[in-house]
Image (cartoon, grey):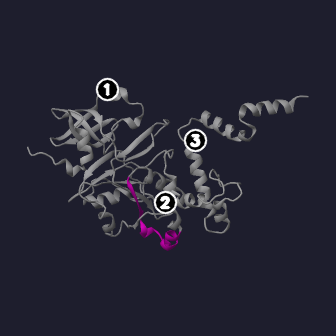
């Protein structure tokens, strides 16, 4: 049996060098479903599970293997034990679905992240800002893909709106009715891994099927509200014909933004902040605020500034339970009185006869 060339699966020098620290076989996680893994090594594909030691040492869900991870494994008769996860060069992280606030790695070691948004009635600039923030933070290169352009009658207006939101991003416009994927294919290079993220029904699966050249993943017809019914439930890594690798990820749920990169997603506000009179300016009521002045002069839209504040606030509360959130809110309310303890003293004094 001929050996598999792991370079086809994105193996690079940085992973090879780190793997020399261990006496196991290097592999890459190619699928994950409900705690079960499949991994590929030079010897073939294996069903895999994590070792007891790795499970014991895991503090967070993000400490478990994810699709795209390079791992060190023991191989045995078609099965494998995952002993160690090699250092990730990039990771796309969200809050685990359900009630948990633990971080979950959706895809690891991705080179390019395609942020997909449909040009239908569901198009939302504020939601796009959220995805761009996390796209930058993943460590991969984000590219914006606007899908279903055949459903849009005002593309020019949308492109104008994107001038401030998609700073530094290449924008690709596609249609499921046309074969216009050349701009996406140029990012699919040998040994390079790409992933498609975005809400369910925006056309990610259609794009992946086009790149693969066959309908590996099933999609369903649009509902009467322009949204596709398909929802991917597994995360899988797939070799593309000719070259490149794609990771298919489920629609994002409970999207956490505690580590989002605001400095890139809101680079315009970050740049304006440097001209504020005070280095710790909150852009609310301080004199000499360059950001508020930009809004007044029409240079920066008020909606974008409000979106910035909203995402910042979400990031502050992300990961807290309801009781912790209420405590944090009260602490902010009474900040001017020197904290909640002093606030209670002040209230008692005022209520004394």
Farthest-out residue, right: 353
Using the numbered discs, state the Cα–Cα distance from disc 2 to disc 3 in whole angstroms.
32 Å
Looking at marks 1 and 2 on the same chain, the residue that comes earlier in the sequence is marked by 1
Residue placed most toward the observer, 201 or 60 = 60
Q: Is residue 48 left or right of residue 172?
A: left
- Between 98 and 276, the residue placed more toward the observer is 276
Secondary structure under badge 3?
Answer: helix
Residue nearest the viewer, comparing 285 with 217? 285
Residue at left offset 61%, top offset 58%: 305
Q: Which residue is drawn at 45% across and 60% down?
A: 117
Q: Is residue 114 above or below residue 65?
A: below
Q: Which residue matches tag 3?
A: 317
| Image quarter (top left, top right, bottom left or bottom right) of the N terminus | top left
Q: Quick check: marks 2 and 3 in contact, CB under 8 Å?
A: no
Q: Give the range drawn in magenta.
A: 140-160
Left or right of residue 77: residue 197: right
Element type at mark 1: helix
Residue 138 at least partly seen: yes
Q: Is residue 143 magenta?
A: yes
Q: In this view, does 180 lie to the left or right of 308?
A: left
Residue for badge 1: 53
Image point 66% across, 61% down: which residue? 292
Is residue 274 in the magenta section?
no
Check the image and name the residue furthest to the left.
1
Observer-side mark, 1 or 2, equals 1
Report the mark closest to the observer, 2 or 3. Answer: 3
The residue sitting at 62% across, 52% down in the picture is 279
Q: On the image, which quarter does residue 21 sit in?
A: top left
Which residue does the numbered mark 2 point to in the structure image? 225
Image coordinates for residue 89, horizontal then vertical, percent: 34, 47
Q: Distance between the Cα atoms at labels 1 and 2? A: 49 Å
Residue 74 horizontal/vertical position (percent): 20, 32
């Amino acid at each position: 049996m001929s050996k598999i060339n792991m370079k086809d699966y994105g193996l690079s020098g940085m992973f090879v060098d780190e793997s020399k620290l261990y006496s196991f076989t290097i592999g890459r996680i190619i699928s994950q479903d409900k705690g079960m893994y499949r991994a590929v090594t030079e010897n073939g594909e294996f069903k895999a599970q994590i070792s007891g030691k790795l499970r014991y040492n895991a503090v967070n869900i993000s400490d478990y293997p994810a699709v795209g991870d390079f791992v060190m494994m023991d191989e045995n008769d078609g099965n494998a034990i995952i002993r160690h996860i090699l250092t990730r060069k990039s990771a796309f992280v969200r809050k685990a679905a359900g009630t948990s606030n633990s971080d979950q790695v959706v895809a690891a070691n991705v080179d390019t992240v395609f942020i997909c948004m449909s040009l239908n009635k569901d198009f939302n600039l504020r939601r796009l800002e959220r995805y761009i923030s996390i796209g930058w933070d993943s460590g991969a290169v984000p590219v914006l893909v606007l899908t279903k352009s055949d459903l849009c009658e005002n593309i020019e207006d949308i492109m104008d709106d994107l001038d401030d939101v998609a700073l530094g991003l290449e924008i690709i416009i596609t249609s499921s009715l046309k074969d216009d994927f050349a701009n996406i294919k140029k990012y699919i290079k040998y040994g390079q891994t790409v992933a498609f993220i975005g809400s369910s029904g925006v056309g990610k699966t259609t794009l992946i099927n086009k790149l693969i050249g066959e309908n590996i993943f099933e999609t369903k017809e649009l509902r009467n509200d322009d949204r596709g019914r398909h929802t991917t439930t597994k995360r899988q890594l797939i070799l593309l014909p000719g070259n490149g690798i794609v990771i298919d990820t489920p629609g994002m749920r409970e999207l956490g933004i505690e580590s989002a990169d605001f400095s890139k997603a809101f680079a315009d506000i970050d740049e304006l902040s440097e001209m504020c009179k005070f280095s710790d300016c909150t852009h609310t009521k301080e004199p000499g605020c360059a950001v508020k002045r930009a809004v007044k002069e029409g240079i920066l839209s008020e909606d974008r500034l409000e979106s910035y504040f909203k995402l910042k606030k979400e990031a502050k509360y992300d990961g807290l339970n309801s009781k912790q959130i209420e405590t944090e809110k009260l602490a902010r309310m009474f900040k001017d009185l020197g904290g909640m303890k002093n606030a209670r003293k002040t209230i008692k004094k005022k209520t004394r006869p």
